[in-house]
């Protein structure tokens, strides 16, 4: 079990920022967040679902020739005419589209997309695609938050997933999306596969102080978009859409409280300076796999009773403009 350090001071600032009680380290952030009119995103079209083949075709259509290194800055959050961070926060909560017109990912701009199969191999008390025997196609986007991408930096690793509840790549289905992050403060790890990305990111390491202004801005805008004063709520992303996938009566569905995805322990680690080079499929002749674990018992700031229940087997990768600027992962509305 990996122990993490609670960055309670940062959380206190985040909570205060969400209620408008804290002036940021930079007056520009506070001024922008309070004086720029909150512009709404374009109306979301009715969601009709997507096929795995059509989404992956777009993601793989425009590979980079040289890996970009996009920076996360407060200047990208706000402009004279728009609060881009609030617009993005509202869009991710309201728009279920799997692909969008070109847009900028403001927090996790640098990533690699991975295609594969989600398989649950163990008995579970859950429904839908958490049930034993469930298999579906999936697209992952592995990324780092903020600007750090290299092995000697404190990297904020994350995984977003788009699960297609089918094995037919041409079947149009409603996708189940999830977003996982290891530590908003960042960790120094040699391997992305060793990161512990979960749907509960209440712990923030002290290294998050390096990004305190950006974290405060994020807390302010996302709590506003979610219409809540609770920062701890916004740092917990529920995964009930996976438990409801394929169920005729979603009201009877059951999903785990916590979801963890990490590199499968039997996969040999690859050393690379840039995590995107580390995760290229060609570097794993024995196959690239992630382990799926869930838990219901534990505490948000303490240990959890993780149980490995399945794997994600990767079959293709793409480092592309569409991976970074077209692929969209909707966030689920919070359920009490």
Image: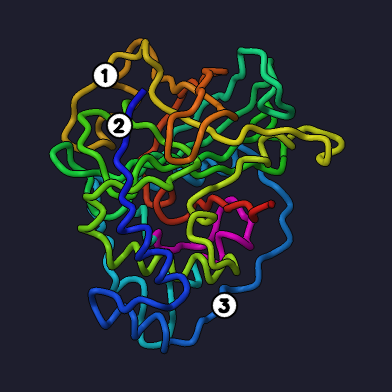
* Nearer-the-camera pick, 294 or 311: 294
Read off the magenta span.
89-105
Residue 220 lies in the magenta stretch: no
Q: Residue at the location (57% across, 24% down)?
A: 118
Q: Which mark is residue 192?
A: 2
Furthest-left residue in this view: 152
**146 sits left or right of 118 in the view:** left
Q: In 3D space, how far apart are the residues under numbered discs 1 and 2 (Cα atoms)?
A: 9 Å
Q: CA distance from mark 3 to mark 1?
A: 43 Å
Precedes in sequence: disc 1 or disc 2: 2
At mark 3, the secondary structure is loop
Q: Please report the residue visible at 44 percent of the width from the left and 63 percent of the height from the top.
A: 103
- Residue 253 lies left or right of residue 56; in this view the side is right
- Where residue 306 appears, as percent x and y from the top left, is 50, 23
Q: Residue at x 52, y 48 (%)?
A: 236
Secondary-structure class at tag 2? helix
The residue pinned by badge 1 equals: 269
Look at the magenta stretch and give its main secondary structure.
loop
Q: Which of 22 and 278 lies nearest the eye of the viewer? A: 22
- Asked if one can make out residue 110 in the rendered structure from this viewpoint, the answer is no
Residue drawn at the location 68% of the way across and 41% of the way down = 241
Residue in the foreground of this view, choosing between 96 and 17: 17
Label 1: how many residues lie within 10 Å, few (<14), some (14-19) or many (20+)?
A: some
Say which mark, if any, is on residue 40: 3
Determine the secondary structure under disc 1. loop
Quadrant containing the N terminus is top left
Which of marks 2 and 3 precedes in the sequence? 3
Query: Which callout, 3 or 1, points at the residue further toward the start of the chain?
Result: 3
């Amino acid at each position: 079990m990996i122990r993490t350090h609670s960055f309670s001071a940062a959380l206190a600032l985040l909570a205060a920022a969400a209620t408008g009680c804290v002036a940021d380290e930079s007056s520009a952030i506070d001024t922008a967040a309070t004086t720029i009119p909150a512009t709404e995103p374009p109306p979301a079209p009715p969601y009709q679902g997507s096929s795995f083949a059509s989404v992956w075709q777009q993601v793989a259509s425009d590979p980079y020739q040289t890996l970009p290194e996009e920076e996360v800055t407060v200047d990208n959050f706000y402009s004279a005419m728009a609060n881009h961070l609030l617009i993005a926060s509202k869009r991710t909560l309201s728009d279920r589209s799997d692909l969008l017109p070109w847009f900028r990912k403001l927090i996790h701009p640098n990533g690699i997309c991975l295609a594969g199969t989600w398989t649950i191999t163990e008995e579970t008390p859950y429904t839908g695609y958490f049930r034993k025997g469930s298999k579906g196609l999936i697209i992952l986007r592995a990324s780092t938050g903020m600007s750090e991408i290299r092995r000697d930096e404190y990297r904020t690793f994350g995984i977003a997933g788009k699960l297609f509840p089918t094995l037919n790549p041409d079947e149009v289905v409603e996708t189940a999306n999830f977003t996982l992050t290891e530590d908003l403060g960042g960790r120094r790890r040699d391997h992305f596969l060793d990161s512990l990305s979960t749907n509960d990111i209440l712990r923030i390491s002290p290294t998050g102080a390096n990004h305190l202004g950006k974290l405060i801005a994020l807390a302010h805008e996302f709590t506003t978009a979610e219409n809540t004063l609770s920062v701890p709520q916004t740092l917990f992303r529920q995964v009930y859409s996976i438990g409801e996938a394929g169920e005729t009566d979603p009201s009877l569905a059951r999903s785990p409280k916590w979801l963890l995805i990490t590199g499968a322990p039997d996969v040999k680690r690859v050393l690379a300076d840039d995590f995107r080079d580390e995760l290229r499929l060609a570097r794993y002749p024995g196959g690239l796999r992630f382990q799926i674990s869930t838990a219901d018992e534990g505490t948000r700031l303490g240990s959890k009773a993780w149980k490995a229940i399945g794997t994600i087997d990767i079959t293709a990768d793409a480092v592309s403009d569409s991976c970074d600027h077209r692929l969209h992962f909707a966030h689920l509305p919070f359920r009490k």
